[in-house]
Image (cartoon, rainbow, N blue to C red):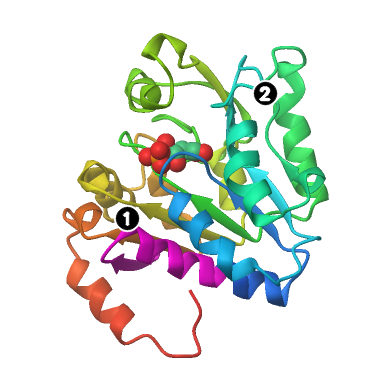
């Protein structure tokens, strides 16, 4: 099962994950990082900034999880713009080595297979950062997504559009469609690190970790992965049945074991 780490604050969660990413980049300078957008991974990117200063990141590659369809890449809320602003520039990554699915309408029919090909050519993702939606989505794999799905166009649920309206002037501006790595794509990454903060994520986290495997709760796909780490704050951990066991396991974790 996934290792569950319950942290006091999102900042503490960001630091734990950032430490693991730095370890990875130091040992594998050509590491391929899977990058999530949204609010959840921001403490990770923030904690990475001082930690990566002085570390050679020139060969690091990055692949974003998803993008809105039909949004201008220059729009401040396109995931291309968010990844540039929050990750590439502050961490000093080479922009040519960081890809985001192409959400332009022109060529959208082959954008998914192109992205799959790029991921394979890069040798796959070493560490995939994930958030989780209140409806249980990971990437933008909304409920009903196949566990075998690959990068493709999806329709966002009304719930996700409502949740993401905070990034736009109004809900009408939130795109209806997205292009997202599939659950099958995400499961190929060598290490999954899912973060969730706040009470609004508690049910989705409990369902993903402890509920039945179900396409109705796409986050439950992480139960299939041999190396998954879930980092949650106390509020997001409130519905976890085995929270005490997770705390006990982490407190007794052998020194030699990384995340
Ligand atoms: C973003 C992504 C989504 C978000 C999820 C949670 O690239 O793939 O799955 O992680 O919608 O969003 P936040 O973090 O804003 O609560």
Image height check: is 20 above or below 137? Answer: below
Query: Quick check: 96 above or below 122?
Result: above
Relative image position of residue 56 (x, y in whole percent): 76, 68
Q: CA distance from mark 2 to mark 1?
A: 34 Å
Q: Looking at the picture, how far across and down is residue 115, in whole percent?
A: 73, 35
User: For residue 132, which numbered disc appears in the image?
Assistant: none
Residue stretch in magenta:
1-20
Query: Are dots 2 and 1 in contact, CB under 8 Å?
Result: no
Above or below, comparing residue 162 to residue 48 in the picture = above
Q: Point out the quarter of the image occupied by ligand 1.
A: top left
Q: Is residue 218 visible?
A: no
Q: Residue at position x 74%, y 63% from top? A: 57
Q: Quadrant of the N terminus?
A: bottom left
Graded by Cα atoms within 10 Å as few (under 14), some (14 to 19) or many (20 or more), the crowding at tag 1 reads: many
x 41%, y 47%: residue: 40
Residue 174 image position (x, y, % from top left): 45, 16
* Residue 209 - label: 1
Residue 59 visible in this rendered orientation of the protein: yes
Which residue is painted at 30% across and 80% down in the image? 249
Choose top left, top right, bottom left or bottom right for residue 217.
top left
Query: Element under label 2?
Result: loop
Residue 51 painted magenta: no
The residue where tag 2 is placed is 73
The one nearer the camera, 21 or 137, is 21
Q: Is residue 102 left or right of residue 121?
A: left
Does the stretch in magenta take in 16?
yes
Picture coordinates of residue 135 (x, y %)?
32, 33
Residue depicted at x 53% and y 41%:
183
Query: Is disc 2 surrounded by few (<14), some (14 to 19) or many (20+) residues within 10 Å?
Result: some
Label 1 secondary element:
helix
């Amino acid at each position: 099962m996934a290792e569950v780490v319950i942290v006091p604050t999102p900042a503490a969660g960001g630091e734990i994950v950032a430490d693991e990413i730095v370890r990875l980049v130091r040992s594998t300078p050509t590491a391929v990082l899977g990058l999530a957008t949204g609010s959840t991974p921001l403490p990770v990117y923030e904690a990475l900034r001082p930690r990566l200063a002085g570390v050679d990141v020139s060969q690091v590659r990055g692949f974003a999880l998803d993008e809105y369809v039909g949004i201008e890449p220059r729009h401040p809320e396109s995931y291309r713009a968010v990844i540039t602003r929050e990750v590439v520039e502050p961490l000093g990554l080479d922009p040519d080595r960081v890809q985001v699915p192409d959400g332009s309408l022109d060529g959208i029919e082959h954008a998914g297979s192109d992205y799959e090909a790029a991921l394979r050519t890069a040798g796959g993702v070493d560490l995939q950062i994930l958030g989780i939606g209140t409806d249980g989505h990971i990437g933008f794999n909304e409920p009903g997504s196949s566990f075998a799905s690959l990068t493709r166009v999806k329709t966002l649920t009304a719930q996700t559009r409502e949740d993401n309206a905070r990034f736009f002037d109004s809900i009408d501006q939130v795109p209806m469609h997205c292009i997202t790595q599939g659950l099958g794509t995400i499961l190929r990454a060598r290490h999954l690190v899912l973060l969730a903060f706040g009470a609004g994520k508690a049910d989705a986290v409990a369902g993903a970790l402890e509920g039945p495997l179900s396409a109705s709760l796409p986050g439950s796909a992480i139960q299939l992965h041999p190396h998954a780490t879930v980092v949650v704050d106390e509020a997001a951990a409130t519905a976890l049945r085995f929270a005490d066991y997770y705390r006990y396991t982490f407190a007794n974790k052998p020194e030699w074991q990384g995340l």
